[in-house]
Amino acid sequence: TTTQVRCAYDSVIETCVVDLGSVCWSSSDTVRALFPSHLFLLYFVFSVVVRKKPLQLTFDMKRLVSSRSGSGAGASSSSASASAGKKGTTLSMYDVPPTEEIKLDEFESFALDRLRVLKELSAVRVRGISKADTDARIREVTNKYLPLLTQEDLRKDNISHHVLRLAYCRQDREWFVHQEADLLKYRLAIEGVGSFLRHNSLEHTPVQVSADEFQTYRSELQACFPRNLDSLLFTHSNYYKVPFTEVLQLVEQRRVFLRDGYAFVFRRDLINWVLSRFRDHLTQKLETTARALPQIQSDRRVAVLLENLAKQAHVSDSAYSSESLAGAVTPSQLDHLAETSFPPCMQNLHKNLRHSHHLRHQGRMQYGLFLKAIGLSLEDALQFWRSEFLRKHDIDSKRFDQEYAYTIKHNYGTVGKRTSYSPYGCYKIITGMPVTGTQDHHGCPFRTFDKAHLDAMLLENRIPGEKRKDIQEKVQGQHYQVACRVFYEAKHNLSKPLDMSITHPNSYYDQSRAHYAEKEGAEPPLEKRQQVERSASERDTSSSTSASSSSSASSSTSSPSPASSTSSSSEPTETHVCQS
């Protein structure tokens, strides 16, 4: 029932599998198979008339090299059987919302199952495990909660997506878009990009590179051709042109050739373009959903469900927006805290602020909101920023009040629309706010620093050699939050791995302060130093007061009256209380 035939695939000889017993059609890309007509007719008659099942073809693009060497039969056969049960593409851009009546228990249970998958996608990114383990974990959770095998599965997938749209259209949008894009990326790696493009009317948007263009830029395209692929795939039919702004990740990784505003993208890398389009599309849909939400929330039952779903995703940035810590930190403590407990992103901002006495807007927002969340009051914040900025020769007090003071007050919610803003989380710091110049110091150092600058920062923080190598490897693999966790472990000399993920600069700071507080029952260095300073100040005050009292007593010609005795004894106590 299974045999191998040869077919032409974009001028490249491929091996495909004809499985007459299968009930699926699986194709990773557009395939033009040219069969001899009599062979095709025999297969058709045998499949449809005799076995009463349609002819099925399963193309395994990943087996090109092995199949040409004669070892692809078994692998292709297993690929065919593994894809049984799917019919065409099961993925979409979620353009069509469900119009049927949905029970409330389905409304909630479908959304919770999808939320479990998205939360797991978010968690595995910061665990630092191997790609194989990551794929295995994602496969396990998606097969359990969001399979795509039956029509009922597809219905659940569509409903659950739109329910979570309602839950996250007003808050944590970036987190939701990012996790949905990751889910689509995982599924595309299984089902292929080509079928997704055709099914969602996106097939003709990328422009195929002509043979003449391919020959003109052959050397440039060869330079960025993936080294691990067969050279037979290096043909014009495997390259497409898309606007370079839609594949910025590929541009950053130097994996595309740029010409006249277009990026020449290899077929396999089209997934990056698809994900970019999907993110833009979903962001626009969330805007539309947000406008319609008040009408949907008129049903109190639905409103409560959506509110509960929104709370279950992850630790929101708003968790660090409490005003109860105001005054817990003063400007004089920041240098010491930056050295011991600030995460690298905030440490870098503090260092550059002290050095140049200025930060650009994005840097001020990122650092200012962080300082607010750790307990720097509005008055202290104005004092801190003013003292730094006035050291710059072209900024005086009047200019500071006009250009900078309002933004600080606005972040604290005392002016404007009086909204108290939350500090930025790791996701926003890493993926948003691009660094555009040498004067920009915001963002995540593990993402924005080159190898030399990153190594210098690690040496400055006295990170051991093995840990530095480990961090560099994590950064090379774009696991920036995992690198930050390794940095924390080395910085705090932990004997075992940290049992939490670094997802927010303020969680890093809180964990660091708790570490020093719990270490062998000792107080954190900052609090210990403050206590020593207070004790020394109290001793100085007491000794000076006692000397003054002794001098007064010795100069008296008679024993002191009760009134004078009371006065002299109460004065040191009064001073002691005030000093404390």
Image: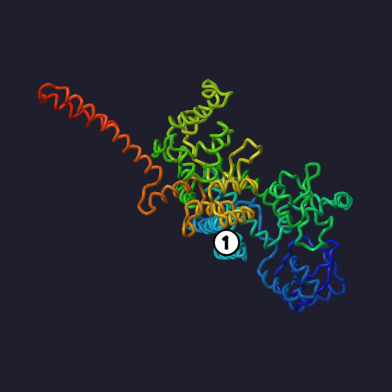
Q: What residue is pinned by disc 1? A: 129
Q: Is residue 348 visible?
A: yes
- Quadrant holding the C terminus: top left
Number of residue marks = 1
Question: Would residue 100 appear left or right of 20 to someone viewing this image?
Answer: left
Residue 27 sits in which quadrant? bottom right
Q: Position of residue 130 (x, y in %)?
A: 60, 62
SS at circle 1: loop
Question: Would residue 308 appear left or right of 527 to someone viewing this image?
Answer: right
- Quadrant holding the N terminus: bottom right
Q: Position of residue 28 (x, y in %)?
A: 73, 62
Q: Residue at x 69, y 62 (%)?
A: 191
Question: Would residue 271 appear left or right of 328 to someone viewing this image?
Answer: right
Who is closer to the viewer here, 205 or 426? 426
Amino acid, disc 1 = Ile
Who is closer to the viewer here, 185 or 580? 580
Question: Would residue 12 appear left or right of 60 to someone viewing this image?
Answer: right
Mark 1 residue crowding within 10 angstroms, few (<14) / some (14–19) / many (20+): few
Q: Position of residue 495 (x, y in %)?
A: 46, 59
Coloring scheme of the render? rainbow
Q: Is residue 160 visible?
A: no
Question: Is residue 497 depicted above or below 53 in this figure?
Answer: above
Residue 13 sits in which quadrant? bottom right
Who is closer to the viewer here, 528 or 179? 528
Q: Residue at x 77, y 62 (%)?
A: 229
Q: Position of residue 553 (x, y in %)?
A: 16, 26
Question: Is residue 137 depicted above or below 206 in this figure?
Answer: below
